[in-house]
Amino acid sequence: MSKKLIRLVDCCMAFDGELVLDHINLYFNDSEFLTLLGPSGCGKTTTLRIIGGFLTPTSGEVLFDDVRMNDIPPNLRQVNTVFQRYALFPHLNVFENVAFGLRVPRREGGRKIKLPEPEIRQRVLEMLEVVSLKGFEHRRITGLSGGQQQRVAIARALVNRPKVLLLDEPLGALDLRLRKDMQSELKRIQQQLGITFIYVTHDQEEALAMSDTIVVMDQGRIQQIGTPEDVYNEPKNAFVADFIGESNILDGIMHEDYVVEFFNRKFKCLDSGFAPMEPVDVVIRPEDIDIVPVEKGQLRGTVTAVTFKGVHYDTIVDFKGFKWLIQTTDYHPEGETIGIVLNPDDIHIMRKSEYSGMFGDYSSYSEEYEEMDGAEEGSGDEE
Amino acid sequence: MKNRRALFAVPYVGWLALFVVAPIVMVVLYAFSSAAGGFTLENFSRMGAYAVVFARSFKLALAATLICLLIGYPVAYMISRESQRFQRVAMMLIMLPMWMNFLLRTYSWMSILENTGLLNRLFSAIGLFRLINALTGANLEYFPMINTQGAVVLGMVYNYLPFMILPIYSVIEKMDASLLEAARDLGAGSARVFRKVILPLSLPGVLSGVTMVFVPSVSTFAISKLLGGSNELLLGDLIETQFVGTAYNPHLGSAIALVMMVVVVVCMAVMNRFGEGEEQAVML
């Protein structure tokens, strides 16, 4: 399993003197579903294009099976890409789009070898079946729906049996339901074929749902690499904590191993290895907080807003001027004073970083939601 | 009216009816009538005498179109690969000659191509004729360039080349760059990307370029008159003489114009069908 297929060693990329990738070190294992996750402009698409061969890094090395690939053009690389807006050939039908890569003569020992037509036909039809487009081979591209075009794009890339498939926000242009369907479909295809997927997205839910490994990026740097559980449960810094899921991020002080202080109160936690009295960021996930009657609470606060979300209520609670988001299934009306209890495993400690103090307070909660809505609408045109 | 904005089209529709449809109807009426009035096919039966002019016109126009395509396509393609700034400057340079009067441009070719014109004087000055004469024993004083079919084709190419470059350029320039990336990604080298993606997708531009060069070339009269002399009469000249020339006969002129129009329209229809057919064939 864990064979390193592709490695990026100290890759930097600058456009017009502006650094978009800042010393990226990353490797990709055989048969893994790896997601590059981050906001627009974080360098995730640039990273993908470097692997695909459309960009040459300003410095650093791209290694495929330990062979330097920096200057090898895309057509000579054993990876294929599913492009953001599919980039299907409008003058070819579904069959010919998928067959495009198979019809390119391969060079073997100085001779050009063409695949025989029956084999091309068989492989194309097989692949169309994999992406559930059986019977669509004579259709025109322009007559297909977004989801169908998406499947053609995936089939066109996969039919060449690449070792690695690169996917650049492939579901960005689809509506929510279709996107969910395609997520599980992509995961199924990846497992069925057992090849490496490198997937670029800005959608954290998508990343959590599909990936074996998530690489969180921001400002051209890797912020954290880990399994979905790792990056959600043990975020490395405030950026990761904020970008993935909802989180309350507070300033704290680590008194000693397993003891942290915030809001002038000491709490037990599960983290160790910090210097005595080291300032830290404390992350508390909204769904981990238990609301209790005031007298039993470790902290007390006042409810300032409640939003019904279906499964739970988003409850904003003011603790001495710092607003928390708490997600509960119990309704607590605005103005009610409540107490909360934090268990040691609800408290996650992070070292201070350049992102400290930038996120975590929910005073501007509703505005943040509006921003997120806007981001979703515009997501198709990103980067 | 369903669409109120359709009202804006009324002036143009009126214009079209008055200055396009009506003249065509008049040409048809003239073509099928005699000077005395009354229906006749005589105008068409007399046309056989001009078959050679028809053949020459189509041959030269075809040659000019082909040359324009061979020059224009690579130019359009290469310009579209360059930076935005380069593209703007290049387009301006291509349009530049068109700011000057058409006749003036063609006249200046006369003074270049004449027996005692610029080119021949240049050849003479560098001793080209002396060299050839010494080598072959000929007695050459100049290259006869003016009043040849070659000169006419040159004039057509010179004047109509921008009409070939522009539509091809605009199609290639608008082509989605990710399509080319996708083709490369699927293993195609530059030549294959061009053959399998760029060329088929630029076909609409080629078709409209071919139309825009061929149609004016086949009906031109000024170019052939100035650069082809009296020997290389084209359809345009023939028609002109029937209307304003010595051989005044608007009925015959109309008949010739009508036949030419029909032939051109049929050519274009066939070509467009062929272009579509190619697309469909790949689609199938």
Image: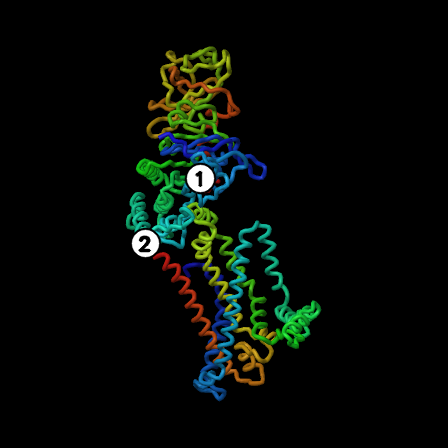
Q: Which mark is residue A138?
A: 2
Mark 2 residue type: His
Q: Is residue A149 above or below residue A257?
A: below
Host chain of mark 2? A
Q: Upstream in the sequence, badge 2 or badge 1? A: 2
Mark 1 residue type: Ser
Left or right: residue A134 versus residue B56 is left
Q: Is residue B176 above or below residue B278?
A: above
How packed is label 1: few (under 14 Cα within 10 Å), some, or many (20 or more)? some
Q: Is residue A220 above or below residue B185?
A: above
Host chain of mark 1? A
Q: Which mark is residue A59?
A: none
Residue at the limit of the structure toward the right, as seen here: B125
Q: Residue at the location (48% across, 71% down)?
A: B17
Q: Nearer the viewer, residue B261 or A216?
A: A216
Q: Secondary structure at mark 2?
A: loop
Q: CA distance from mark 2 to mark 1?
A: 31 Å
Quadrant in the picture for residue A335: top left
Q: Residue at the location (48% across, 84% down)?
A: B49
Q: Nearer the viewer, residue B259 or A347?
A: B259
Q: Residue at the location (56% across, 71% down)?
A: B153
Residue at the spot of label 1 = A379
Q: Nearer the viewer, residue B131 or B115?
A: B131
